Amino acid sequence: MNLKDTTLYKFLIVLLVLASIPALFSGVMEPDGALYASMSKNIILFKDWFNLYGRGADWLDKPHLTFWLAATSFKIFGISAFAYKLPSFLFGLLGTWYLYKLAKDIYDAKTGLISAVIFLSALHIITSTFDVRAEIYITTFTLASIYHYYKAHKGSFWHVVAGSFFAACAIMIKGIFVLIPVFAGFIIYWLFTKQYKQLWQPKWWIAILAIFVFITPELYSLYTQFDLHPEKIVLERTGVSGLKFFFWDSQFGRFFNSGPIKGKGDISFFLHTTLWAFLPWSILFYTAVVNLFKRKNRVNLAPESIMIWASAAVTFLIFSLSKFQLPHYILIIFPQFSIITALYLKKLEERGLKIFFTVQSILFVLIIALLSALSFFYDFENPYLIVGILVIVLAAAFLLFKGVKLETIIARSAFASVGLMLFLFIFFYPALMKYQSGSEAGEWLKKNYPTAKPAVLNYIDAFSFDFYAPGEVKYLHNYGDLDKIKSTQDLVIYVPETELLKLKTEYNAEVLKSFEYFHITKLTGKFLNAQTRNQVLEHFYLVKLN
């Protein structure tokens, strides 16, 4: 394919964006995505933008902005999976644009475009396009903040305000720990380049003050929902301060494992997480990091590179030392990973090009082979169609992009991700969603019994049912709760199989519909194998009391 390289990278960016669009038109996944969607739905149902409710109770774990953005989309487009996913998708595109701008301003346009291609085609970015949580928002807001502070460093004051606004947005998505990837790079860059005076520049203190001004909507919401109501039972106790949780327990409490939400921690967790999450670029990325330890490979790089490396390294170290770790945390520094990988790719000479031409091509073939095998192993309705599409993507990449050169490596790697997107978004995820019983039950209820008053009995993780069912879903934590509302007209209860016998014998319950369930974000070989799938399925039911 004879395209100017920058035109090629623009083409790949457009292709990756187009391949992402089908993700918007499928369901919302449990647990986190469906929980956040149901809480955003409650904002619209209750017409209350300051108090968050999840699982039928006051909810404190995350700040408000994720839910405000989704609820705004619901207000415009109606309550649907598409409306929930759209803001995250758009902010992901905004983040890609900021990544391009930052890399372009520090290095050049080519580095910016390659970084954008790498970012959009990384595996965990792809899966996050479908399984929407908070991390895409955090990634975009932290990156936008870094970009504007970088411009402010060069002299323009309005960038201080813009940087603080986006930093505040990131805080209102996740908490104050997001300031680490924002400021760590700058501070270490100033120390390494002996720009000590920058630490005392008034504009940076104004920036910090502006951040606190911009987060006042979050502080007000937390104060009115929790601090003004110490009688509320939150996190299994009373007297909970929303402000204290926001500034300490949710962040430092998790890091030191002293807060109400605890984890185990593994110092190597993000090393092996990055290996799969940053595919198909992870081998290149790790090689690029090792390459940075050689002084000769750093001498011709822009001094601001220290800012990129330090931001990634400090955040990665903090995550690794934390006792509370989840794979999607690493997304926050994928923009820095993308720039580091892009810079290394651009510097590859003949021997390196040959090695990674081979590595990336083999990786591409392996991805297509594994997905093709899974198509039959899972027993899709049209496995030959799926394999045919995957083979066409593979053939197109190998026919259009030939020769041992940088453009071929990047294009083939991006095409591998396009093939993966088509497989996941059009075939795999929609097939999995049939086993998310909550969304299936909610959709069935909406179509067949729209006047139903939905409830959940003795099951607190019914997030997708909560989102998909019509109206407000009541959470019944015991049979005493059920007795209080059992005479409600059109009451329909979503229950696990363990509750079915008692409901039939003591409450004369009628089963309206049964649904198969599997925890689809924790896939196992037995589930993926069509021959053994029934062995691991659970069952949930919609019942009506007579």
Image (spheres, rainbow, N blue to C red):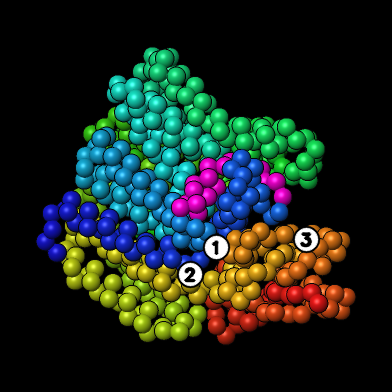
- Residue plotted at (42% across, 14% down): 202
108 or 486: which is nearer to us?
A: 486
| Secondary structure of residue under mark 2 | helix
Q: Return the residue nearer the eye: 4 or 344.
A: 4
- State the quadrant of the N terminus: bottom left
Say what secondary structure mark 3 lies in: strand
| Residue 371: quadrant of the picture | bottom left
Q: Distance between the Cα atoms at labels 2 and 1? A: 9 Å
Q: Assess whether mark 1 and mark 2 are in contact (beta carbons under 8 angstroms).
A: yes
Could you tell me the amino acid type at mark 1?
Answer: Met
Which residue type does callout 2 highlight?
Answer: Tyr
CA distance separating discs 3 and 2 = 30 Å
Q: Nearer the viewer, mark 3 or mark 2?
A: 3
Of the image marks 1 and 3, the number of the one nearer the N terminus: 1
Q: Tell me which segment is drawn in magenta.
A: 57-76
Residue 230 at what x, y percent from top left? 77, 35
Q: Which residue is mark 3?
A: 476
Q: Is residue 260 magenta?
A: no
Residue at figure coordinates x 46%, y 61% from the top left = 82
| Left or right side of 384 for 507 | right
**Whether label 3 touches label 2, CB < 8 Å:** no
Q: Image height check: is 295 above or below 376?
A: above
Residue, disc 2: 429
- Dot 1 corresponds to which residue? 29
| Structural distance between the alpha carbons of marks 1 and 3 | 23 Å
**Residue at 62% over, 70% down:** 450
Mark 2 or mark 1: which comes first in sequence? 1
Q: Is residue 205 above or below residue 276?
A: above
Q: Residues within 10 Å of mark 3 (few under 14, many from 20)?
A: many
Q: Nearer the viewer, residue 367 or 169?
A: 169
Snapshot quadrant of residue 541: bottom right
Query: Mark 3 or 2 closer to N-term?
Result: 2
